[in-house]
Image: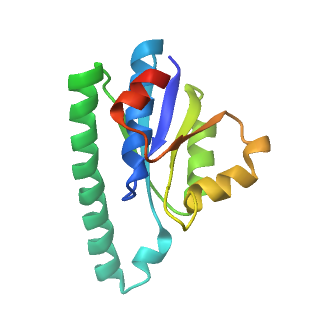
Amino acid sequence: MRKFLVVLDDSRECLCAMRFAAMRAMKTGGGVAIISIIPPEEFNHWIGVGDLMREEARERIQAHFDVFAKWMRDSNKINPELIIREGEPVKEILSYVKDDPEVGILVLGAGTDNSGPGPLVSQLSKSSGSFPIPVTIVPGNLSKEQLEAIT
């Protein structure tokens, strides 16, 4: 089964990417894998504090995932899987894509404010020619109706 890989973060555009991936997966008989990466700089503290912060980050990610997963199951009959990694985002995404041969497309949401599309979209755009799978960039300001029309 081909999977759509979506990055879960705290950005607004993440919602559009999630919706797009779920709608495409439903219409093509695919699945959705949701990856969230905890940056290493969040844990440059004493060992005990770093461990506590790591656990809190995992709990926050799980809570966000639970909301998206319920919506995907209820609206699109898709049961997504959650992957949590720690490290540099681009490196961890690439590593996961290489580890899971079922991942066929990476779906990213692009920011719509004046600061640009976002750091992940900017970084991956530079290496998209050598990326092992297609990358779909979804504008972060699309409505549900617009997403339905293009999926």
| Most foreground residue, 79 or 52 | 79
Q: How many marks?
A: 0
- Image coords of residue 89 (percent x, y): 55, 58
- Image coords of residue 48 (percent x, y): 29, 80
- Please tell me which residue is depicted at 43% across the width and 14% down the height of the picture: 27
In the rendered structure, the answer to whether residue 12 lies left or right of residue 24 reads: left
Q: Quadrant of residue 129?
A: top right
Q: Is residue 140 visible?
A: yes
The single residue placed furthest to the right in the displayed view is: 129
- Image coords of residue 91 (percent x, y): 62, 55
| Most foreground residue, 88 or 121 | 121
Above or below residue 32? Residue 52 is below
Q: How is the image coloured?
A: rainbow
In the rendered structure, the answer to whether residue 76 lies left or right of residue 1 reads: left
- Please tell me which residue is depicted at 30% across the width and 64% down the height of the picture: 57
In the rendered structure, the answer to whether residue 29 lies left or right of residue 63 reads: right
The single residue placed furthest to the bottom in the displayed view is: 46
- Please tell me which residue is depicted at 44% across the width and 22% down the height of the picture: 149
Q: Quadrant of residue 15?
A: top left
Q: Is residue 29 visible?
A: no
In the rendered structure, the answer to whether residue 48 lies left or right of residue 125 reads: left
Q: Quadrant of residue 32?
A: top left
- Image coords of residue 93 (percent x, y): 57, 48
Above or below residue 87? Residue 107 is above
- Please tell me which residue is depicted at 51% across the width and 44% down the height of the picture: 139
